[in-house]
Amino acid sequence: MKLEKAQAKCKRETSKVSLANLFGQCESVFKQSQKDVEGLKSKFIKMFKEEELRADALISALEETKKILSVQVTLKYQLLKALSLVVDELNDLSRQTF
């Protein structure tokens, strides 16, 4: 029953449209689809490049932060060593004085 209705509707619709007109509509839709796809492709490429630049900037910032933290850790370690030597010397002086 549904198949018969669908076939009848299809016959009505196709009888209204000439083959050349139908081809023209299909071609128009195809060309518009191509334009849409190309437009989306360009947008995607642009977004990808922008995200790539952001990622590169973040990586550079992280590498710079890593360098700064490494220097700070090294300086703090050296300070700790120096303070440890001062404490040792103070302990030695304290033992010698008392």
Image (cartoon, rainbow, N blue to C red):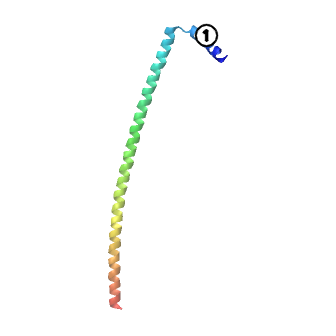
Q: Position of residue 84 (x, y in %)?
A: 35, 76
Three-letter amino acid code of the residue under disc 1:
Arg
Q: Report the number of discs.
A: 1
Element carrying mark 1: helix
Q: Position of residue 36 (x, y in %)?
A: 46, 25
The N terminus lies in quadrant: top right
Image position of 8 (left or right of 93): right
As drawn, 1 above or below 94: above
**Residue at the bottom extreme?**
98
Which residue lies at the image location 40% right of the left edge and 44% below the top edge? Answer: 54
Instruction: Kindly indicate the quadrant of the structure image that contains residue 12.
Output: top right
Instruction: Rate crowding at label 1 as few (under 14), some (14 to 19) or many (20 or more) other CA atoms within 10 Å.
Output: few
As drawn, 89 above or below 6: below
Image position of 71 (left or right of 44): left
Is 17 in front, or is 95?
17
Q: Position of residue 31 (x, y in %)?
A: 45, 19
Image position of 67 (left or right of 16): left
Q: Position of residue 87 (x, y in %)?
A: 35, 80
Which residue lies at the image location 38% right of the left edge and 41% below the top edge? Answer: 52
Residue located beneath label 1 in the image: 12
Instruction: Kindly indicate the quadrant of the structure image that contains residue 89.
Output: bottom left
Which residue lies at the image location 41% right of the left edge and 38% below the top edge? Answer: 48
The C terminus lies in quadrant: bottom left
As drawn, 3 above or below 54: above
